[in-house]
Amino acid sequence: MDKNVNIDWSNLGFSYIKTDFRYISRWKDGKWDEGKLVEDNKITISEASTALHYGQQCFEGLKAYRTKNGKIQLFRPDKNAKRMNDSCRRILMPEIPEEKFIDACIKVVKANEAYVPPYGTGATLYIRPFIIGVGENIGVKPAPEYLFCVFCLPVGPYFKGGMTPVNFTVSEYDRAAPYGTGAAKVGGNYAGSLLPHELAAKKGFADCIYLDPMTHTKIEEVGAANFFGITKDNKFVTPKSPSILPSITKYSLMHIAKEYLGMEVEERDVFIDKLDEFKEAGACGTAAVITPIGGIEYKENFHVFHSETEVGPVTKKLYDTLYGIQFGDIDPPKGWIVEVK
Ligand SMILES: Cc1ncc(COP(=O)(O)O)c(C=O)c1O
């Protein structure tokens, strides 16, 4: 695409920028329509839509990357499609066929190609698919109609500082209930996280750590990212719990740690009073990529891992490998990369 956009790619943060095209498809009478690209970034829906009152909506987040030779590629979009369908089943919304999901992402990226940041800037095109319950309804029941939409915007790092360590504090609040919707990417989980985030930010922390809602003894999530730690004997460890959002980045890092770096990998309980077992720790997610954790405040203690100012060597290797795969510099495992042609 020849269009020139006036963006300072190297100084992008994580904030909304209106790009030119978005995709929209409607579900009605038991099926999705064909869907189309539109220019208008406003959606008009009934005031009685379930998405507005009862939180019947879910979303996804993935990225398009520009490679050294100018190609554009998506990272594991099939995993986002599957997770979106897991979310849909949890809140009684119609599933979206995997091919339709990936095709919509590709269409949106292609139509907004001018906004895909150049290779080497560290910036990417963030893609936000979502499904909302719409139509006239007032009882607490599934909506009569649904919209599946995808838009995109260029982004820089989610946490200010990118690969420099940031600090977190443990929240007294829960982001999810023990048998609730923590594993689904539904808006309600995030509405509940706004206050704990603000309290953490006011104390000078990047975000808060959530403990398991049942016992408040084990780490679950780091804001809107998953946790990992590197033990003193070099194992990659990440928490396992039914109320964690299954991070695609986390599962990718588990594979990278094992297959690319030859590390042992464990998905198991991580106790908040046993942080000493880790020499390094990080937060991982599509937006966060890998953000090294400098230290964690818990009650009166502040536990520092590797350093509050420097990234640890294992975290760095994990980051370089993941980043290399996403930007096309390192051979990916089979099926991880989808080229936008
Ligand atoms: C609560 C939460 N945890 C973890 C993640 C990281 O997941 P992923 O690696 O699939 O982006 C996200 C972001 O999607 C999230 O919102």
Image (spheres, rainbow, N blue to C red):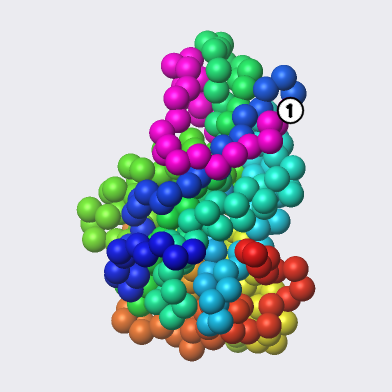
Q: What element does badge 1 sit on?
A: strand
The quadrant in which residue 339 appears is bottom right
- Residue 134 visible in rendering: yes
Q: Residue furthest front?
A: 2
Q: Residue furthest right?
A: 334
Left or right, 319 with respect to 330, comes to: left
Q: Position of residue 247 (x, y in %)?
A: 60, 58
Q: Residue at x 59, y 84 (%)?
A: 329
- Residue 212 visible in rendering: no
Answer above or below: position of 60 versus 267.
above
Q: Closest to the observer: 50 or 178?
A: 50
Q: Position of residue 313 (x, y in %)?
A: 48, 88
Q: Closest to the observer: 175 or 5?
A: 5
Residue at image mark 1: 31
Q: Residue at x 43, y 55 (%)?
A: 153
Q: Closest to the observer: 304 or 13?
A: 13
Answer above or below: position of 41 versus 160.
above
Q: Residue at x 50, y 39 (%)?
A: 38
**Classed neighbour count for the residue bearing mark 1: other residues with Cα under 10 Å, few (<14), some (14–19), many (≥20):** few
Q: Residue at x 70, y 39 (%)?
A: 96
Q: Position of residue 20 (x, y in %)?
A: 43, 49
Count numbered badges in the picture: 1
Range drawn in magenta: 31-59
The quarter of the image holding the C terminus is bottom right
Kind of residue at disc 1: Lys
Answer above or below: position of 309 versus 226.
below
Asked if ligand 1 lies within 8 A of label 1, the reply is no
Q: Position of residue 234 (x, y in %)?
A: 60, 85
The verdict on residue 98 being magenta is no
